[in-house]
Amino acid sequence: MVISDIALHFPKNLSEAIRLLGELEEARVLAGGTDLLIEIKQGLVMVKNLISLKKIKELKGIEKKGNRIRMGALSTLEEVMSDPLINQYIPALADAAASMASFQIRSMATVGGNISSAVPSADLPPTLIAAEATVELHCSDSSREVSLSEFFTGPREMICGKGELLTSVFIPLPPDETGIAFQKFALREASALAVVNVASKLTIKKGKIERALIVLGAVAPTPVLASKASGLLCGNKPSDSLFEKAALTAREEGNPISDIRGSIWHRKELIQVLTRRTLDEALSQVQGKLRRGK
Ligand SMILES: Cc1cc2nc3c(=O)[nH]c(=O)nc-3n(C[C@H](O)[C@H](O)[C@H](O)COP(=O)(O)OP(=O)(O)OC[C@H]3O[C@@H](n4cnc5c(N)ncnc54)[C@H](O)[C@@H]3O)c2cc1C
């Protein structure tokens, strides 16, 4: 498809963007374009109209709002990586953003685009789901907030209806004594999609794990909340043997495919190894906070 055949629109605010999305024929939203423009050039997506979000101020910025962090959908991966709030409260999200692509791509690519592309190997969703994030969706006459864990319905499929825009991501500030860690295995150091990625969150109270969430990426059509492995941790004291058992259980909760980047066996091995690493790292974060008396 020739890109010059497509009409490009630059709405100045959210309501104009939503109106255009409802009115225009074969219209798609354009954020950083690092995913969509490639798909269009490869003929995988046919569009007549692209609605750029670039000029919409409401979609920008990362800020603290009450007991949550709000990330505008247009926040770029470079902004996420360097944001003081993200680095203070959810450093794993900065790690996930830093693991992606190259400086050039990260400067264009957005949080909203990474989520809305709904690619199984996307790097932000596992950490966001582990952090219990919600997303705000807007359409012409209403808005709703849904848990990110319920957002994805299949590869490149989500609950977002036609004419609906993802406007913000909300992350609750993690309770004290909480650690969240992200790990990714890719075939190269830079600019490579995840073969497997894992994010884990641990909240520890009085020496016992009060809450645990292990989320696996690139091992099923949508991110997988490894509920058996997470449940196994709760109520117990963290230990090597417990973490090993949880990692082994998580290994069976993924449902990976064999493809050009890895076999089913390799991906299962990776789930186990990366889960163990994220649990160790999340625990170290909690222990570090306790030492500093936070
Ligand atoms: C070389 C290269 C390396 C990459 N490496 C990685 C990697 O390591 N990890 C990774 O996860 N991804 C990677 N990607 C994929 C891509 O860069 C990211 O997914 C990026 O975050 C997409 O964001 P974007 O703003 O560019 O989205 P766009 O391309 O603009 O949009 C993607 C999709 O989301 C929709 N969309 C965008 N914003 C919204 C919104 N606010 N509401 C509703 N729908 C919306 C668009 O209509 C489109 O369907 C890579 C891409 C390239 C080209």
Image (cartoon, helix red, strand yellow):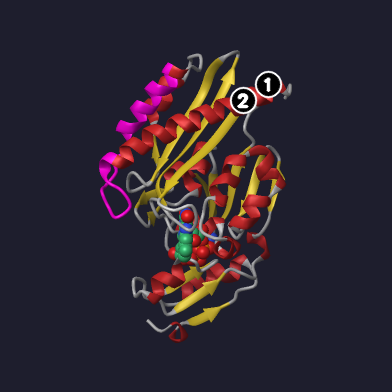
Residue 215 location (% of width, % of height): 44, 37
Q: Is mark 1 within 8 Å of ligand 1?
A: no
Q: Amino acid at mark 1?
A: Leu
Q: Amino acid at mark 2?
A: Val
Query: What residue is disc 2 on?
Result: 286
**In the rendering, which numbered label is found on residue 133?**
none
Specify few, some or many for label 1: CA neighbours under 10 Å numbering under 14, 14-19, or 20 or more.
few
Determine the residue positioned at 61% across, 25% down: 286
Q: Quadrant of residue 227?
A: top left
Determine the residue positioned at 53% across, 57% down: 112
Residue 258 location (% of width, % of height): 25, 48
Q: Is residue 259 a member of the stretch shown in magenta? A: yes
For the residue labelled by badge 1, is the local secondary structure a helix, a strand or a loop? helix
Q: Is mark 2 within 8 Å of ligand 1?
A: no
Q: Which residues are magenta?
A: 241-265
Query: What residue is disc 1 on?
Result: 290
Residue 60 is left or right of residue 224, and the answer is right
Q: Nearer the viewer, residue 199 or 194?
A: 194
Determine the residue positioned at 42% across, 77% down: 25
For the residue labelled by badge 2, is the local secondary structure a helix, a strand or a loop? helix
Q: Quadrant of the N terminus?
A: bottom left
